[in-house]
Amino acid sequence: MSQSAEIPSPDELNYVTSCALPTPWAQFTLHAFVEKTTGKEHLAMVLGDIGNGAPVLARVHSECLTGDVLFSQRCDCGAQLEGALKKIADEGRGVLLYLRQEGRGIGLVNKIRAYRLQEAGADTVQANEQLGFKADQRTYGLVKPMLEQFGVTSLRLMTNNPRKIDAMTKLGVEVAERVPLLVNRNAFNQYYLDTKAAKLGHMMTPLTPAPVEDGAL
Ligand SMILES: Nc1nc2c(ncn2[C@@H]2O[C@H](COP(=O)(O)OP(=O)(O)OP(=O)(O)O)[C@@H](O)[C@H]2O)c(=O)[nH]1
Ligand SMILES: [Zn+2]
């Protein structure tokens, strides 16, 4: 399980350009970056004044073509993407980084291989390992220079993944608050979500409100 957070040298990432991106929930600005060594195109969707120093509502989202685009119910990615954009729109301020590390870093075709192994009985971690990969091959080093582009140093991070929070901290990006993103648990993904909680440490229990003291109401 590697989530190393090496900071790439500044010349590994090019900021290229931006455009308006109207969505059903708000009009974002879409910013394009290119990773020099791989040619991978990474994106940032920005809403409001995020460079004013206050912690920014943020989602660091890893690509999941099957969930984000093809409506797959095998995972929670598409619903998390939509939920995060809606939350940012509700607040009128925030950023979503869309990182092109499909399949926890193993790529789309290998993820489909992994799904086939899961249909034969492996869980999501075992399937990666049977293919010769670590459970999670992602890195988050690009997050720092992407956020620096917008003057952002502190996040209210929408995630259930404690290792993502650790990775941000190691990069020198403050996580001022974790905002849970619990969406779309269904019959097709409950084993996957339970495996993430059991083996990858995801926090899948809803935060309960603090108990109300007697006489407080
Ligand atoms: N290898 C593999 N990758 C998967 C599988 N299901 C989803 N993914 C990928 O996992 C990534 C999303 O990882 P998650 O652990 O769901 O989410 P996370 O971003 O780490 O955590 P959250 O912030 O709580 O959503 C995306 O890149 C998906 O393509 C699977 O069964 N096998
Ligand atoms: Zn997914």
Image: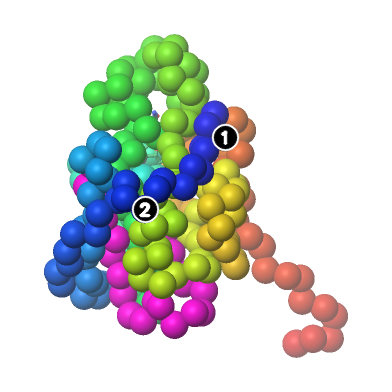
Q: Earlier in the sequence, mark 1 or mark 2?
A: 2
User: Is residue 139 at all visible to an observer of this figure?
Assistant: yes
Confirm or reject: label 1 Cβ below 8 Å from ligand 1.
yes
Amino acid type indicated by mark 1: Leu
Please rate how many residues cluster around mark 2, counting C-alpha atoms within 10 Å: few if below 14, some from 14 to 19, many from 20: few
**Nearer the observer, 166 or 177:** 166
* Residue ID at (56%, 58%): 172
| Residue at image coords 51%, 79% | 54
Residue 157 bears which disc, if any? none
Judged left or right of residue 87, residue 37 is left
Residue 200: mark: 1
Callout 2 amino acid: Pro
- Quadrant in which residue 113 is drawn: top left
State which region is magenta: 40-60
Q: Please provide percent x and percent y for residue 187.
A: 41, 37
Mark 1 element type = loop
Residue 184 percent across, percent down from the top left: 40, 49
The residue identified by callout 2 is 10
Q: Quadrant of residue 108?
A: top left
